[in-house]
Amino acid sequence: MTNTGKGFITHEDSRAFWRRSYPANVWVATDLRESRKWVARHNGVSKTKDQAQALVTAAMDEVQAAWDELSDEAKAATPGRPPDVTIP
């Protein structure tokens, strides 16, 4: 689900459960009643870990391919090739 800005994660959400964002608008959260309400409030869709990882991997493949196409000078101005991302 897409972070919509202010109010996407409330103070109450922050205290109620752990969550982390990943590329491709993938969010991993503790599976609790409160986190399920948060997902429903933002019209999120639950995915299996394999489905979520496939989305993250596809997004990172695009970012890495774009970096690979940069000139050597442009690459030198970056912190390096974006790494692979594995969700927990």
Image (tube, rainbow, N blue to C red):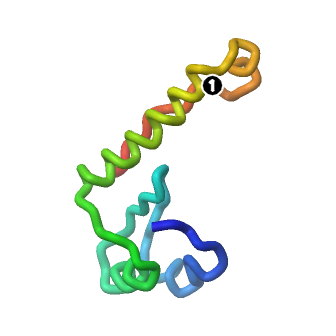
> As rendered, which of 12 and 74 lies closer to the eye?
74
Residue at the spot x=55%, y=77% of the render?
9
Left or right relative to 5: residue 28: left
| Residue under pointer 1 | 80
Residue in the image at 66% along x and 78% along y: 6
Horizontal side of 10 relative to 58 (left or right) equals right
Q: Residue at x 69, y 12 (%)?
A: 72
Image position, residue 46 (x, y; %): 29, 68
Image position of 24 with respect to 63: above or below:
below
Question: Badge 1 local density, few (<14 within 10 Å), some, or many (20+)?
Answer: few
Kindly state the secondary structure of the residue where label 1 is placed. Answer: loop
Q: Position of residue 35 (x, y in %)?
A: 38, 79
Quadrant including the N terminus:
bottom left
- For residue 47, side relative to residue 8 (left or right): left
Q: Residue at x 59, y 84 (%)?
A: 11
Give coordinates of residue 32: x percent, y percent.
31, 80
Residue 58, quarter of the rendered image: top left
Amino acid under disc 1? Gly
Would residue 63 be found to the left or right of residue 35 on screen?
Answer: right
